[in-house]
Amino acid sequence: MIHDESAPTGTGTKLPALEPDFFNEVFEKDGRVRTHYGPLMGAIGSLNEGELAARISRANGRLREEGATFVLPDDPDNSGRIFPVDWIPRIIPPEHWQTLQAGLSQRGRAINAWLREVYGGKQDVVPDEVLRDSVFYRPHAFPGEHPVHVYGPDVVHVKPGEYVVLEDNARVPSGIAYSDVIRRVGMEVLPELFEGYGVAGIFAYYSRLRATLLAAAPPDVDEPHVAVVTRGERDSAFFEHERIARSCGVPLLTLSDCFVKGGEVRTRPEGRRLDAMYRRFDEDYVDTDLPEMKNVYLNGKIGFANSFGAGVADDKAVFPFVPAMVERYLGEKPVLQNAPTYSLIEEDGRTEVLDRLPELVLKPREGYGAQGMLVGPEASREDLEEAVRRVKKDPTAFVAQEFLDFSTHITHDGENEPDEAFVDLRAFVLPALDHVMPGGLTRVARPGTRVVNSSAGGSSKDTWVLE
């Protein structure tokens, strides 16, 4: 419901107040703006009639100029589409960020401690049948000291100050370059919005990432040569790969630029030894395109970020056990709780989940980007029936998660009426340095759904952590 009691007089274009249906981070239930959003909404109101729409159009044009695009399978010419952005920032108060930072750092350290035991052959936190059935488990992996160098958990805000983790992403978590470019373009095109705020900087993340990549190299290398390695321009996240490499001051390569000689990985054309790579592709790509490199890795002659086998921490059937990892390996109580998640392996639990499927979320264990996910309350009867058939055919391939009423935000494209949309946070954590970037990529669902992925029609926001 929209009302205009807060609309200014004169020529300003202040957004009308929103009386939200859910826990909205900008507006109270009665439509009053929350205190820490006051200067932001006032800055929007200071713009002349039509100016906000013009600025949003200009900002979107700058994204295209920066090359901030992504490719979907149905793109006809593979040229990519502009990354969808909602230009009204999300604000995280400092006391909220202190909790998030502590909890995300804690999870990253615990996951790495567990992975070291997984590949040391002695873990007992996760049931053996869950671990061995994971498509990401690599029994001969050599993960090193920090198997997960770049960690990207997804977090939701369920009530004021309480955040819950939805997923752990430990294979190839993405989004940092989009977070970077949204901040830069916002500062350039909408500088008024930043006035009155002390917003924590995010650009130092790249220097921390570079240090992380250097730390991924074998310990006996004095001056490591590191690179970002991509599948190439046809990769949907190539913009990000290119921007990371440039911002970290390292080469951007493909596996065709690499070859193995004398038990080492070397790069064309100069034949220089490569000591560590930030691999922006799944492990199977190595098996098909440069299989001999795997032995170099297993022999400890090159480091990978993230390590081969680290993806088992991505398995959604492993996710429920992360709080136990925190307690076992760190001797601490978890700062952040998991969204309640259920295994479908046991028949009794499976029967209960199938009976409740219209009110739950069903996820493939190895899924990403919302692929194969079913949101029960938003699903058709036909989709629910098909999901039941899939689960009965292979119950070990799925988990179920409670359908949460997490927070919403105002969304506005500069043309249509403002609306209310669900948001989550993709955080960026570097466990080897115990660093959490102050902010992240807030992902915005299409109004009426909770699926935030851009491939499913979602958009993204800048995320401000207040100092």
Image (cartoon, rainbow, N blue to C red):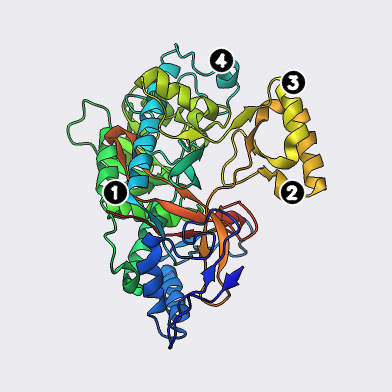
Disc 1 residue type? Tyr
Q: Nearer the viewer, mark 4 or mark 2?
A: 2
Q: Mark 3 points at which residue?
A: 347
Secondary structure at numbered mark 2: loop
Secondary structure at numbered mark 4: helix
Asked whether residue 271 is in view, the answer is no
Q: Mark 2 points at which residue?
A: 379
Disc assigned to residue 128:
4
How many marks are shown on the rendered structure?
4
Secondary structure at numbered mark 1: helix
Q: Where is residue 107 in the image (x, y as percent from the top left)?
A: 40, 31
Disc nearer the start of the sequence (3/1): 1
Q: Splitting the image into 4 quarters, where does residue 417 fall? A: bottom right
Disc 4 residue type? Asp
Disc nearer the start of the sequence (1/4): 4
Disc 2 residue type? Ala
Q: Splitting the image into 4 quarters, where does residue 115 fall? A: top left
Q: Position of residue 381 (x, y in %)?
A: 82, 47
> Callout 1 environment at 10 Å: few (<14), some (14 to 19), or many (20+)?
many
Query: Could you say which is closer to the camera, residue 55 or residue 339?
Result: 339
Disc nearer the start of the sequence (3/4): 4
Asked whether residue 86 is in view, the answer is yes
Q: Nearer the viewer, mark 3 or mark 1?
A: 3
Q: Which of marks 1 and 2 is in front?
A: 2
Q: Position of residue 373 (x, y in %)?
A: 65, 43
Instruction: Name the residue at the top extreme.
Output: 122
Residue drawn at x 45%, y 12% is 121
Disc assigned to residue 205:
1
Q: Position of residue 208 (x, y in %)?
A: 26, 44
Q: Contact (CB < 8 A) between labels 3 and 4?
A: no
Disc nearer the start of the sequence (4/2): 4
